[in-house]
Amino acid sequence: MTKILSGKEVAAALKEKLAAEVEQFKQKGKTPVLCIVMAGDRPDSAAYIKGAVKRCTDIGIDCLVEKLPEEISQDEFLKVIERLNGDTNVNGILIMRPLPEQISEDVVKYKIAPEKDVDCFNPINVSKVMSGDGDGFAPCTPQAVIEILDHYGIEISGKRTVVIGRSMVVGRPLAMMLLKRNATVTICHTRTKDLAGEAKRAEILIAAAGKARMVTKDMVNDGAVVIDVGINFDENGKMCGDVDFDSVSEIAGQITPVPGGVGSVTSTVLAKHVIEAFKHQQGL
């Protein structure tokens, strides 16, 4: 019988551990602080912020939101980032993307202080992930995948692992993180020849292509671990992943659902990174 890998269970366990750690800091009069920067009023960004603020607050982290006008100039936006970089009371900074069209991400990413960059936006942190240097912050979503695998005791080392998706947000950094854990990693994408054949070889199959239900039963090996990173909406407005859950769950050994899978863990990983930044800045 296929085992459902509940992201909510993983998040709850991690939340309990982190909350206990923050409580110890508070007893000494110190509290980790996250600042989320949002320019404009995108509904998807607002929804993510709402969830992140709730999760951080539940854990005991103070969460500030810098809500900036959609029409803010790049210079003014950079001044906000520079102010937060220099604010010793702020331990972590999260910049909501995409940014308004007048603000260049290629400029902004170099301005956020690497030690406060809790979602791997600055190229310094990106290069650390790519080189296997653990002294930095990985993107929250790939880290959430690792947290799920570890929570359920799924061995990574030596496993044939296929990642479908090559974005710098999920696919590429996740592949490097798995490689660091000694997985044998294949990265696939929309132009991969015989994608089904490549996917079917995987002992751990991770779908992160952003295409609704693209991974079907014929692409999955019997008993494989299937991790679905995708968040899509079908023609009926129902949330679904990159995996056709109903058919794939008949053959997979273990599988994450959507919703209730990887996405459920991401905001808790963000909180974990804020705490790590706080400890580093406090010299703990």
Image: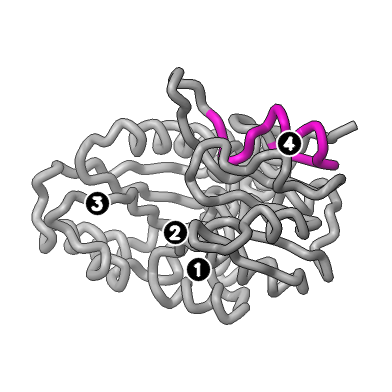
Quadrant location of the C terminus in the rendered image = bottom right
- Residue at left offset 43%, top offset 57%: 92
Q: Amino acid at mark 3?
A: Leu
Point out residue 150 in the picture as x, y percentages from the top left corner.
Answer: 78, 54
In this view, the residue in front, 275 or 265, is 265
Q: Secondary structure under badge 4? A: helix
Q: Are marks 4 and 2 in contact (CB under 8 Å)?
A: no
Residue 253 falls inside the magenta stretch? yes
Establish if 70 lies above or below 187: above
Q: Are marks 1 and 2 in contact (CB under 8 Å)?
A: yes
Chain-order first, disc 1 or disc 3: 3
Does residue 45 appear to the left or right of 233 in the view shown?
left
Q: Magenta span covers which residues? A: 240-256
Camera sees residue 105: yes
Q: Which residue is mark 4?
A: 248
Residue 210 falls inside the magenta stretch? no
Q: Which residue is mark 1?
A: 281
Q: Which residue is mark 2?
A: 91
**Marks 4 and 1: which is nearer the front?**
4
**Marks 4 and 2: which is nearer the front?**
4
In this view, the residue in front, 214 or 54, is 214
Q: Amino acid at mark 1?
A: Gln
**Marks 4 and 3: which is nearer the front?**
4
